[in-house]
Image (cartoon, rainbow, N blue to C red):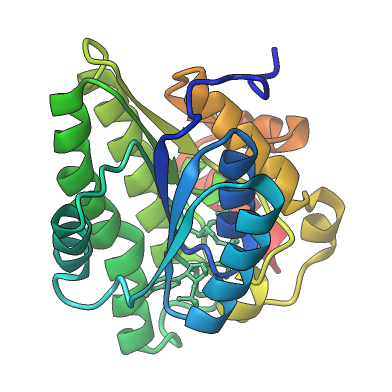
Amino acid sequence: MSTKDHTLLRGKTALVTGASSGLGVDFARDLASRGCNLILVARREDLLRQHADEIAARYAVKVEVVAMDLAAKDAPQRLYDQLKAAGRAVDVLVNNAGYGLYGSFTQLEWERERAMLEIDIVTLVHMTKLFVRDMVARNFGYVLQVASIGAYQPSPLYASYGAAKAFVLSFGEALSYELRRTNVRCTVISPGVTATEFLKVAGQQATLYQRMLMMDSPTVARIGIEAMLKGKPSVVPGFLNSVGAFLPRLLPRRAQAALAEATMR
Ligand SMILES: NC(=O)c1ccc[n+]([C@@H]2O[C@H](COP(=O)([O-])OP(=O)(O)OC[C@H]3O[C@@H](n4cnc5c(N)ncnc54)[C@H](OP(=O)(O)O)[C@@H]3O)[C@@H](O)[C@H]2O)c1
């Protein structure tokens, strides 16, 4: 059942991280189409403003922009304090900001990898800690955690990224269970390859396998928001991606790693 005509989010406020490109923009558009006001966060302020203007004009919602490096020390706390001081309550948190790094583990530069682990793991948990407490206190809220299909098996050539997303998957599903007696829902979306800036940032040319399975970003975002509004703990968008997430369970871990690497070369 489509949740498109849902009035649940009308007049509520969603905070979307990583909303300057790709999935973040489409999460924001989808939420706005349901009448939700937005706070968009990322580093590239010019892009955030462009998207904010377009979304506000198209959906008649309020859109605020916060340009911030969320991997910087205490960034989530500063963002939380800033919104609290402005009297802004966050009803929906989309923890989407993040990136991957492609390549042999021994070749990847540590500083870029450290920053990736910071945004993909520490920032996501800190944002959740800060905003979910208030949602529980108000007895209303939704959190969407963005993991990856790479979370479902060891992912050679994306070794630390895949492991970071395995953390997000496990963390989000556990939190979903912890929150079951509240009116706050936590959902993990694990996209397969999606047409965004992801591969460019990761430093990878799309493989044949990836080109065949690539999904468009608005579709993936819609599937994520619909799963979130239904209170599902987890969703893998697309039939082939769902099969790809399930099949490795039937294989020994080493075979899973070999298969994952074969699809990435
Ligand atoms: N596309 C895929 O194939 C795919 C598959 C599985 C999972 N994912 C996940 O989906 C999420 C969104 O990625 P995408 O595919 O939409 O890629 P994208 O187009 O590169 O978008 C990534 C977003 O994260 C933001 N970001 C990165 N580092 C940041 C930082 N330090 N502080 C604040 N914002 C930061 C970027 O904004 P600024 O650069 O302006 O800061 C950008 O808005 C990521 O978590 C990614 O791991 C993507």
Q: For this view, does 264 lie left or right of residue 112? A: right
Locate residue 12: give its quadrant: top left
**Front residue (pair 97, 28):** 28
Q: Residue at x 23, y 64 (%)?
A: 79
Q: Residue at x 55, y 20 (%)?
A: 7
Picture coordinates of residue 54 (x, y %)? 68, 63
Q: Residue at x 51, y 17 (%)?
A: 230
Picture coordinates of residue 260 (x, y %)? 61, 53
Q: Residue at x 21, y 37 (%)?
A: 132
Locate residue 145: give its quadrant: top left
Locate residue 17: give its quadrant: bottom left
Quarter containing the N terminus: top right
Looking at the image, residue 77 lies above or below residue 169:
below
Tell how many labels.
0
Looking at the image, residue 195 lies above or below residue 116:
above
State whether residue 225 appears in this view. Answer: yes
Picture coordinates of residue 50 (x, y %)? 62, 73
Quarter containing the C terminus: bottom right
Picture coordinates of residue 171 (x, y %)? 28, 38
State whether residue 250 appears in this view. Answer: no
